[in-house]
Amino acid sequence: MRKFLLALVILSTPALALSDKPYLPASYSPIEIVPPPPGEGSAQQQRDLAEVLDVQKTRTDALIKRAESGGNYLAIVNALGANLKADKIPVTNAFISKVTRETSAQVDFVKDCWQRQRPFAVSKAVQPPGQQAENMRVKPGANMQAGEKSRPMPAICPAMRPTEYSFSYPSGGASVGMTAAILLAAMVPEKTAEIHTRGREAGENRVILGVHFPSDVAEGRLSAAAAIAVMTQNPAFNADLADARKELRAALGYAN
């Protein structure tokens, strides 16, 4: 999963004029916001699995290609008719990259708490295309053990179990898409509908590929939205957002 997130997030440029402090307070706890996943064998888990299988039956080659292509916030920007590179909007790039790192860290924390297995690990009927399942495999030396975390797990989290694949809940891809959509819509509100349509695709793609359940996607979006809502209480976040907004709007030809 972490490899997937790295593919989605453009490498950050130097922080430029951005705040060098985290936007989220150290006390922020996503475990208190994102509910636990459906239980193993529960009716909701079965509905989740049935939806993945339904999508698998109807997915087209074009949808698979779209889903496998991944994307980042620039894919959303350029879908609006632009053709921007990260080096043309360095403040925007650094800002969105920083926020995405923070929202993604919250997703990883929840994943390691609840340890939900991916759809294809739950049912052999789920067949991710290409190397998608292999991409989810935990590599030797990967940090998937709660005891190795600098941040202690809450007592509510189950004891860590061995796992062949990275965990499924919530979806990091959905979180990345929602993060980008929220930030870009705040910068270019004239294109809110188009931006969120593209941002939602990031989560939908993960179900199309059979590597996430629909509830993973829903809670990945919630995780990102909740974290950003807390960030908006930080004056440094709002100042950096204003600078990125001014830069991006100028690059796109919008009045500030």
Image: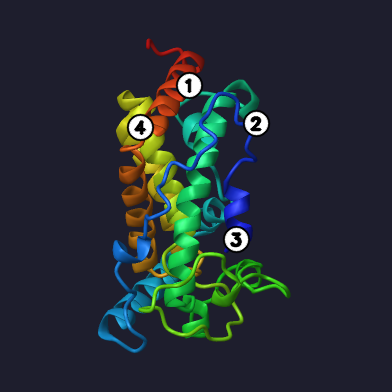
Q: How many marks?
A: 4
Residue at image mark 2: 14
Nearer to us: label 2 or label 4: 2
**Is residue 143 left or right of 161 when viewed as pictured?**
right
Quadrant (top left/top right/bottom left/bottom right) for the N terminus: bottom right
Q: Earlier in the sequence, mark 1 or mark 3?
A: 3
Residue at image mark 4: 185
Q: Residue sitting at 50 percent across and 69 percent down?
A: 211
- What distance separates the C-alpha of mark 4 from that of mark 1? 11 Å
Depth check, front residue: 221 or 122: 221
**Is residue 129 left or right of 223 when viewed as pictured?**
right
- What distance separates the C-alpha of mark 2 from that of mark 1? 17 Å
Instruction: Identify the residue at the far right of this view.
Output: 140
Nearer to us: label 2 or label 1: 2
Q: Amino acid at mark 4?
A: Ala
Q: Residue sitting at 40 percent across and 35 percent down?
A: 183
Q: Residue sitting at 41 percent across and 75 percent down?
A: 53
Dot 3 alpha-carbon crowd within 10 angstroms: few under 14, some 14 to 19, many 20 or more: some
Residue at image mark 1: 248
Marks 2 and 4 in Cβ contact (< 8 Å): no
Q: Amino acid at mark 1?
A: Leu
Marks 1 and 3 in Cβ contact (< 8 Å): no
Query: What is the secondary structure assignment of the residue under circle 3?
Result: helix
Dot 2 alpha-carbon crowd within 10 angstroms: few under 14, some 14 to 19, many 20 or more: few
Residue at image mark 3: 2
Which percent across, then down, holds residue 73? 50, 38
- What distance separates the C-alpha of mark 4 from that of mark 3? 26 Å
Marks 2 and 1 in Cβ contact (< 8 Å): no
Which percent across, then down, holds residue 250? 47, 13
Check the image and report above or below for 249 versus 43: above
Q: Earlier in the sequence, mark 4 or mark 3?
A: 3
Which percent across, then down, holds residue 172? 48, 58
